[in-house]
Image (tube, grey):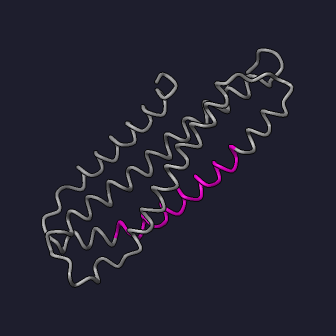
Amino acid sequence: MLDWKWPICVFALVGLVGLGARQAIGHVYSSGQAVDLLQSLSQSGLYLGSATATASATTLALMLTLVGMVRRSDEDFNAEIYRGIQRIATLSTASLVASLLLLLVLVFPVSEFDGIPAPWYPTLYQVLFGGTILVVALLAATVALVYRTVRHVIARVTPGEDA
């Protein structure tokens, strides 16, 4: 559990910032206001979702490269490096899946649907905003793990005690 300390802290911090942003926006009082917010969220959310999906897929590919580098290195790496890479892969996969789900939901033309009851729009906005926060928080936690693992690898392969 101690190994997850930094990613959990970063995840919680980003979640709190997202909650603060949600509070700053205020309550959604009408379905018309919710539709406007949904359209605004979907425009920026599509960019966020695609960027996060790209970053997560790239991170997974780079972790495969790191495993190969660690295996070919002259240094003897302990199991901690491999556990770190596995944790990064787990969070990257979760980020990728969450990003793809967010993208899938955001491409629906919700404001064009006539059959959706008006009270559902504020709830849909809350869910999409929460999904956006989740995607950003997962990516931030992944970055914290990547930093920790790469720093550990660099410390092992750097000659001397400069790292």
At 21% from the left edge and 62% from the top edge, which residue is drawn? 123
Q: Is residue 16 above or below residue 77?
A: below
Q: Is residue 152 above or below residue 107?
A: above
Highlighted range, magenta: 40-63
Q: In this orientation, which residue lies closer to the viewer: 139 or 73?
A: 73
Q: Is residue 2 above or below residue 65?
A: above
Residue 19 shown left or right of residue 96 in the figure: left
Instruction: Return the x and y of residue 7 as percentages of the image width and height.
Output: 48, 34
Residue 51 shown left or right of residue 35 in the figure: right
Residue 69 in magenta stretch: no
Instruction: Return the x and y of residue 126 as percentages of the image width and height.
Output: 25, 58
Across the whole image, how many numbered discs are drawn on residues?
Answer: 0
Query: Which image quarter holds the C terminus?
Result: top right
At 65% from the left edge and 53% from the top edge, which residue is drawn? 58
At 80% from the left edge and 25% from the top edge, which residue is drawn? 157
At 56% from the left edge and 41% from the top edge, which residue is drawn? 143
Residue 137, quarter of picture: top left
Instruction: Return the x and y of residue 105 as percentages of the image width and height.
Output: 38, 68
Residue 10, quarter of picture: top left
Q: In this orientation, which residue lies closer to the viewer: 67 or 56?
A: 67
Residue 158 shown left or right of residue 116 in the figure: right
Residue 53 in magenta stretch: yes
Mainly helix, strand or loop, the magenta region? helix
